[in-house]
Amino acid sequence: MEHGLGSFLYSRDFRPHPTAAREPVKVEPPATRYNRGTVPLTCYLDAFSGISGDMLVGALADAGADQNTIAGAIASLEIGATVSFEKVKRCGIAATKYHVEAGDQQSHRHLSHIVKLIEKANLSERAKHDAVAVFQRLGEAEATVHQVPIEKVHFHEVGAADSIADIVGACVAFDQLAVSTIVCSPVNVGSGTVDTEHGVLPVPAPATALLLANAPVYSRGPAVELTTPTGAAVASRLAKSFGVLPPMKLSRTGYGAGGHDFPEHANVLRVILGESTEIEEALNVAIIEANIDDLNPQVLGYATERLLANGALDVTLQPLLMKKDRPANLLRVIARPEHREKLAQVVFDETSTLGLRIYSAERRVQSRTWTEVDTPYGKVRVKVSGEGNYAPEYEDCRRLALESGVALKHIIAEANYAYLNKSR
């Protein structure tokens, strides 16, 4: 699927047929390629030049997914499509280009027809489930764009054999590489306009914009379509989250080539594979701030409770002196990106502020585990960091202090003593 040639739901011709014959790519024997193994991997989609279906399959193949396995899976769909892989360069970076040869194909398919094709193919259960889920996501987007029931949606180019080969190929590759978690970067969608079956439309095309709702997007580079609905559907349906590179032990990378070779940047999708270091906290966060000088402190305390109850990672109040020597408080909320708008509305609802400052920040956190220790007053959970730092859980200590009548500081000291004895 070529960048700049239009939305995959709308384009008249979203992947032109190659004009020159290509030598078949020599595929390494499976034994010399990535061994699937038993360790589940995290896959980071680095969409700095957008994402499309063919770029994704090419990147996963470049990272070690077996090309023969992908080709066999596409053949089992019996849609008349054959695939090949070609080594190319984009701005000097070696990448893999995924090609689909489909010939003349049925131009319209319903979702139910596509689901039947996938279910009867020789695919793993996971690959079937994921592929059907991606097409379901596309169907919902198409139905919303055209305001028709999903059962009546005619998939135009989306129903073509090469589009099915893109989505199925990606799902097969994820499964073959034992990818358990997918995270996507903020997505470069491109800019300008795209010539479609419904006329000239702005980039991102309506379906792409709908599919990427609530995902972080931006526009940089040439004025062409960089992210297609195919890529947007796979990322929005299969990615666990959008944001910065998650903590992992990096094992390999792969580069999937787009159709154009831009002079100003490498037109590739990079995938980064590695073993998760199991840090679950959000690493990319939104900071929401407001200076408040005209609100009862009791109301501020209640607002803090409401923010935490609605998913804030942390809420702080900091005394400050504002204009006209007015004492005030700086309310600062740390939020996951997906909770930003909800928490901003809570601030407006529960405080007197008329404006907010919102900006992005990155967190650095250590992995943590929990253990339990016995004290003379009861059990206390202790949080232990990856570097060996530890702290008794305050709520446990507080509960025991109230139940026993013993001072809280003594409960905390007993918990620390018990942990040190246990860890020797």
Image (cartoon, grey):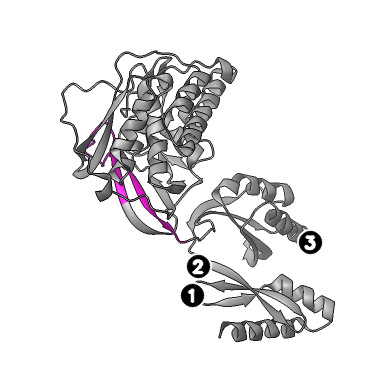
> Are circles 1 and 2 on residues that touch, CB within 8 Å?
yes
Task: Give the alpha-carbon distance from disc 1 to disc 2, as whole Å.
Answer: 8 Å
Looking at the rendered image, the quarter that the C terminus falls into is: bottom right
Question: Does the magenta portion include 345?
Answer: no
Disc 3 target residue: 298
Disc 1 target residue: 387
> How far across and down, in percent of the image, does residue 102 sit?
31, 20
Disc 1 secondary structure class? loop
Q: How crowded is mark 2: few (under 14 residues within 10 Å), some or many (20 or more)?
A: some
Residue 98 visible in the shown view: yes
Residue 340 visible in the shown view: no
**Disc number for residue 366:** 2
**Residue 55, quarter of picture:** top left
> What is the span of residues highlighted in magenta in the rendered image?
253-277
Three-letter code for the amino acid on which mark 3 is drawn? Gln
Three-letter code for the amino acid on which mark 1 is drawn? Glu
Q: Is residue 105 left or right of residue 328?
A: left
Q: Earlier in the sequence, mark 1 or mark 2?
A: 2
Task: Give the alpha-carbon distance from disc 3 to disc 1, as whole Å.
Answer: 39 Å
> How far across and down, in percent of the image, does residue 83 sit?
28, 28
Q: Is residue 364 above or below residue 96?
A: below
Q: Which of 85 and 332 is in front in this view?
A: 85
Residue drawn at the location 43% of the way across and 29% of the way down: 229
> How far across and down, in percent of the image, does residue 129 sit?
51, 34
Disc 3 secondary structure class? helix
Q: In this view, does 33 lie above or below 382?
A: above
Q: Which of marks 3 and 2 is nearer the N terminus?
A: 3
Q: Is residue 9 left or right of residue 66?
A: right
**Residue 2, quarter of picture:** top left
Q: Which of 327 and 175 is in front in this view?
A: 175
